[in-house]
Image (cartoon, rainbow, N blue to C red):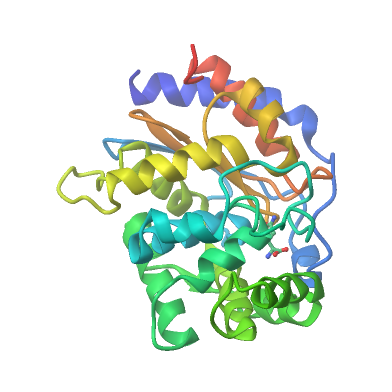
Amino acid sequence: MNIKTIEEKLDDAILSSKKYIGIGEVASYIPELANVDADNFGVALVKTNGEMVLKGDKDIKFSIQSISKVIDLIIALEDRGKEKVFSKVGMEPTEYKFNSIRPISDRAANPLINAGAITTCSLIKGADVDEKFSRVMEKVKNLSNSKDIVFLEEVYNSEMKTTDINRSIAYYLKSIGIIENNADDVLDLYVRNCSIGVDIKQLAWIAAVLANGGKSLDGKEQLIDKEVVKITLALMAACGMYEESGKYLIEVGFPSKSGVGGAIIAIIPGKCGVCTYSPRLDKSGNSIRGKELLKEISQTLDLNIFI
Ligand code: GLN
């Protein structure tokens, strides 16, 4: 489909998603997140050849939040290999909330909930937290084809002050031997990664690289190993929208990952990456307008991967 037609269809989808304006609440358990304008809205679609459509608030930087779990997983798989990673974290969805301690038996259910991402963070290589975090930042810059990736210090400080549940999870994982290094350091890295500031184009670009099998959009470089991309996309399809993942996959039909900052990334293999941004969330922590817009986009652009 040519980019002009895509843009027209995207405009229609945006129009029909307007009925969701004002529905849902911004996340406030991280106090700083409650300071964003609840009605910010944007969508970016990047084709695997690099052509793109950007709509709405394209210059606003927001915190990546749980979309960083995708990056954590990719780096952990690249650093340690899948045997090691999946000896520490499972591959199955869970009915519990993203920050629940319950989906941990001998290990966390999957890498896309907090317990699982805290585990993958513990597997990222580096001499100390600073070095590990700078590797994560480099990865985000590399995959988004952009140097303008920032660290949102207020978001980080705000979460560090209030993150008792994630601290509990980290300490619990340490106590059962899943985390082998210092639990405070692992938590610090996890929260730093959640506090990375991005815009819709940068996230859609990362999604497009995943849609392109891990290759840069100029086709010149394999930025992520293909096997790692396959695992990541399968887990995003199965677990990317928390306890709503199954229903969402039926309705939307492609791998996605949400974050409580209000963004959702979606990957349509071989075709494009999409990022929606709208901070009002449902009770699972998924952006309401973003979800509805992706449902609409899936239909109007015929993007469901199953049919
Ligand atoms: N930083 C957030 C947390 O750990 C990320 C959660 C999310 O985006 N769902 O609670």
* Left/right of residue 50 with respect to residue 66 in the rendered view: left
88 relative to 47, above or below: below
Q: Name the image quarter holding residue 276.
A: top right
Residue at 39%, 33% (x, y): give it.
272
Residue 63 shows up from this direction = no
Q: Position of residue 189 (x, y in %)?
A: 56, 77
Residue at 49%, 21% (x, y): give it.
8
167 vs 271, nearest the viewer? 167
Residue at 39%, 81% (x, y): give it.
126
Ligand 1 is found in which quarter of the picture? bottom right
* Left/right of residue 225 with respect to residue 176 in the rendered view: left
* Left/right of residue 95 with respect to residue 215 in the rendered view: right
Residue most toward the top? 307
Q: Name the image quarter holding residue 116.
A: bottom right
Q: Position of residue 63 (x, y in %)?
A: 61, 63
259 vs 46, nearest the viewer? 259
